[in-house]
Amino acid sequence: MLKIAKEKNQYRVELFQVNRLNTLFSELVKQQLTELVEEPGITVVFDLDDIRFIDSSGFDVLLEVSDRAREAGSQFKLCNITDDVRELIILMELEEKFDFVTCENSREKILLVLD
């Protein structure tokens, strides 16, 4: 489900072989992202490059993980937001709730793929 790469104190996370963050697997994604952000001082960048749709449960996950990161002293950021997802973020008035960064293609080694 998640493809995770680590470089120094930063994890880069992508959804693997899916293009939606929805009710079907949002709880699993929340659990896996929360485990990463619970490490103080770590930055988790969630790459949404191939994601075309996020439903309300998906946005709840992103908000909860973002809040948990702040509580734990880590950072949770989003990158490569598609136009479709950006439109949803704007419609739901969530622009101020997330940290956005620009992701570059990297030579990161994949640590693991979680189902």
Image (cartoon, helix red, strand yellow):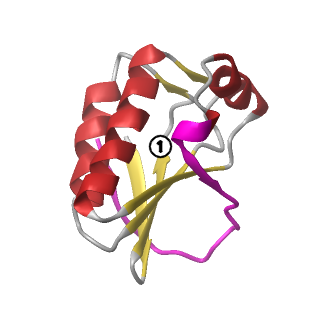
Q: Which of the 4 image quarters holds residue 57?
A: top left
Q: Quadrant of the N terminus?
A: top left
Q: Residue type at mark 1?
A: Phe
Please say whether residue 107 is one of the residues in the magenta stretch: yes
Percent coordinates x, y for residue 96 in the rendering: 59, 39
Q: Which of the 4 image quarters holds residue 115?
A: top left
Q: Please name the residue shown 78% across and 31% down the image.
A: 83
Percent coordinates x, y for residue 16 in the rendering: 47, 43
Would you place residue 58 above or below residue 37 in this image? above
Would you place residue 74 above or below residue 94 in this image? below
- Residue lying furthest right in this view? 83
Q: Please name the residue shown 21% across and 53% down the image.
A: 35
Q: Which of the 4 image quarters holds residue 31?
A: top left
88 and 29: which is toward the camera? 88
Disc 1 crowd rating (10 Å Cα; few below 14, some 14-19, many 20+) is: some
- Residue lying furthest bottom in this view? 8
Would you place residue 7 above or below residue 51 in this image? below
Which region of the structure is painted magenta? Answer: 96-115
Residue located beneath label 1 in the image: 16
Percent coordinates x, y for residue 92 in the rendering: 60, 18
102 and 66: which is toward the camera? 66
Percent coordinates x, y for residue 106 in the rendering: 63, 73
115 and 22: which is toward the camera? 22
Q: Please name the residue shown 25% across and 54% down the image.
A: 71
Q: How many marks?
A: 1
